[in-house]
Structures are given as structure tokens and as C-alpha cells.
């Protein structure tokens, strides 16, 4: 299996948008031409001990996430969780990375899925998923992918899998923004012919 290549931003002069990736799992991305090819690594959560020491066996990627000077994030902080294997290796902790991404053409966002363990034999999985989006030039977006929790019908917190993509609309002169969900389409599962 080929190693995942880090995401390569579009060349200078290309039409771009800004994308903030927030995940406690793994998110990849690539240009989309109607088939699924090799995606590149946007963000992969790493494992950290209670005193915030990174696990050498499960490092985050990129080690130093990029920043684009975007407006403050809208999404809440993602929860930490135990991995389903090697629980003593620490908790998966969210990673936030910002990129320039191509605008005006379809772009594939891919969640690689995750498995969270608990003490005992139970675990929860979030399935892998793919979404195709088209970003507008000069605008800012967030993608929020992974495992989080929300109040259930009984009022107790329940684990949920999230995969949201939205535009950050600035609110006047304030530093705040309003999220506008963007329409995503499913990606076809046809593999691109190898080059």
C-alpha cells in the first residue's frame, strides 16, 4: 500500500478558496474528475497522553498544521476518544489545519472513518465517507469530520459521527462568522485509471 502523500496546494495564480479542516479522525482531499484517484492527506488526528505528550506510534499529520489567517472557527471543539486498539497509547485529539484549495472545480473530501474504544469490549465506529464540493474563489470554508457528542432524545449525551462542510460568512465588522452549509454530492466509487 502506497503511503499517503501530504496535500499539495494549487500553484500561485490559481483560483483558490480557504479551507479549515477540523477532525479527530483522518481527512483527505483531491481534485475530482468523476472518478476516485489517490487522495492526499489534509489532516490526521494523533494520539496524546493526559499530559499532552504525543504518541510516537500515532503522530498527527501534518506535525505542524498550516495556518492561512482565516476568521475564527465556528465549529465547537471535538472530543478526545480512546482508539479501539492499543488503548494505553493515548487519546485521539482533534487537529486543525488550514489550506488553500482549488475553487471553481469539483473537489473530493474523504473521511477515512474511525473506531473508538471504551473500557470493556464495546466500541463505536464512524464509517468512511466521500463528498464532492465546489468552493467559490476567495471564500472561506470549514470541514468538520469525526466523532463528537450531542444531547439525545433522553437528554443524555450520545456519540455521533459528523461530516459537515460549510462556508464561513463574515458577520459585519465583528470577528464572528455564520456557517452556511454547502451542497455536497456523493462521489462515484469508480477508480480513476492509473497513470
Image (spheres, grey):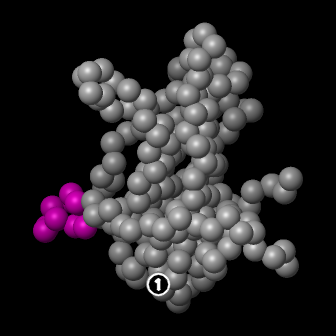
Q: Quadrant of residue 29?
A: bottom right
Answer with left or right where residue 173 lies relative to residue 38: left
Look at the image and say whether residue 173 sits in the magenta stretch.
yes
Q: Which residue is mark 1?
A: 104
Depth order, front residue of 185/71? 185
In the image, residue 69 sits, relative to residue 43, either above or below, namely: below
Q: In the image, residue 11 lies at what x, y percent?
A: 60, 83
Determine the residue positioned at 38% across, 39% down.
77
Determine the residue positioned at 46% across, 76% down.
134
Q: In the image, residue 175 lies at what x, y percent?
A: 21, 59
Depth order, front residue of 100/152? 152
Q: Residues within 10 Å of mark 1 (few under 14, many from 20)?
A: some
Specify whether residue 76 is in view: yes
Specify whether residue 69 is in view: no
Answer with left or right where residue 74 lies relative to residue 102: left
Determine the residue positioned at 26% across, 27% down.
153
Of all residues, the one furthest to the top in this rendering is 120
Determine the residue positioned at 44% across, 66% down.
184
In the image, residue 15 sits, relative to residue 17, either above or below, namely: below
Q: Secondary structure at mark 1?
A: loop
Of all residues, the one furthest to the bottom in this rendering is 13
Span colored in magenta: 169-178
Q: Quadrant of residue 178?
A: bottom left
Q: Quadrant of the C terminus?
A: bottom right
Amino acid at each position: 500500500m502506497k503511503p499517503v502523500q501530504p496535500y499539495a496546494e494549487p500553484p500561485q495564480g490559481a483560483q483558490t478558496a480557504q479551507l479549515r479542516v477540523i477532525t479527530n479522525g483522518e481527512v483527505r482531499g483531491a481534485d475530482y474528475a468523476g472518478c476516485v484517484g489517490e487522495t492526499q492527506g489534509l489532516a490526521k488526528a494523533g494520539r496524546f497522553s493526559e499530559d499532552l505528550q504525543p504518541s510516537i506510534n500515532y503522530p498527527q499529520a501534518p506535525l505542524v498544521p498550516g495556518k492561512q489567517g482565516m476568521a475564527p472557527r465556528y465549529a465547537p471543539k471535538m472530543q478526545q476518544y480512546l482508539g479501539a486498539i492499543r488503548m494505553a497509547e493515548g487519546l485521539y485529539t482533534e487537529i486543525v489545519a488550514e489550506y488553500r484549495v482549488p475553487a471553481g472545480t469539483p473537489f473530493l473530501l474523504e473521511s477515512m472513518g474511525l473506531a473508538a474504544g471504551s473500557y470493556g469490549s464495546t466500541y463505536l465506529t464512524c464509517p468512511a465517507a466521500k463528498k464532492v464540493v465546489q468552493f467559490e474563489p476567495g471564500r472561506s470554508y470549514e470541514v468538520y469530520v469525526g466523532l463528537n457528542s450531542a444531547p439525545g432524545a433522553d437528554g443524555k449525551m450520545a456519540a455521533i459521527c459528523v461530516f459537515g462542510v460549510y462556508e464561513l460568512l463574515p458577520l459585519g465588522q465583528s470577528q464572528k462568522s455564520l456557517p452556511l452549509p454547502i451542497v455536497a454530492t456523493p462521489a462515484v466509487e469508480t477508480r480513476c485509471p492509473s497513470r
